[in-house]
Amino acid sequence: MPEKPSQHTKSDWPITIGTDILGGTRMFHGTHVPVKAMFEYFRRDYSLDEFLGVFPSVTRDAAVAILNEAECATLAMAPA
């Protein structure tokens, strides 16, 4: 069962928009790693641990927070 969507504030949100880096790409906060890269890894059947091994600047907490938000958003859009 997914958790409720988080109530992150702007200061603790795990995503940063790199306006001066990568042309506005959404990145993991404090890194130059695009969030999209994590989902691309999953599409290619890599695990979260493998992704974190390749991108050690991404914290597990940040990755899990983004996955939780994605799950909640997906389920909220699903027809009842």
Image: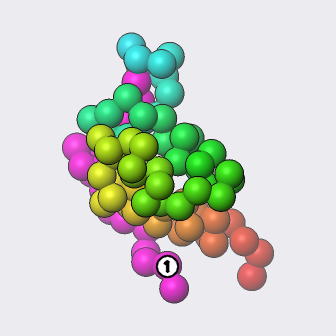
Q: Is residue 2 magenta?
A: yes
**Residue placed farthest to the bottom in the image?**
1
**Picture residue at 72% right of the left edge, 71% below the top:** 78
In percent of width and height, residue 66 lies at: 44, 56
**Picture residue at 54% right of the left edge, 68% below the top:** 72
Considering the numbered disc 1 on the image, is that residue within a helix, a strand or a loop?
Answer: loop
**Residue placed farthest to the right in the image?**
79
Residue holding disc 1: 2
Q: Compared with residue 72, is residue 37 higher up or lower down, i.e. above or below? A: above
Kindly tell me whether residue 22 is visible in this rendering: yes
Name the side, left or right, on which 63 lies relative to 46: left
**Picture residue at 56% right of the left edge, 67% below the top:** 71
Q: Compared with residue 39, is residue 7 higher up or lower down, i.e. above or below? A: below
Q: Alpha-carbon neighbours of circle 1 within 10 Å: few (<14), some, or many (≥20)?
A: few
Q: Compared with residue 20, is residue 47 higher up or lower down, i.e. above or below? A: below
**Picture residue at 51% right of the left edge, 85% below the top:** 1
Name the side, left or right, on which 72 lies relative to 61: right
Kindly tell me whether residue 69 is visible in this rendering: no
In percent of width and height, residue 73 lies at: 58, 63
Name the side, left or right, on which 45 lies relative to 1: right
User: In this view of the protein, which residue sits in the foreground, 21 or 75?
Assistant: 21
**Residue placed farthest to the left in the image?**
11
Q: Amino acid at mark 1?
A: Pro
In percent of width and height, residue 12 lies at: 24, 49
Name the side, left or right, on which 62 lies relative to 69: left
Quadrant where the image shows the C terminus:
bottom right
Q: Is residue 66 magenta?
A: no
| Quadrant in the picture for residue 27 | top left
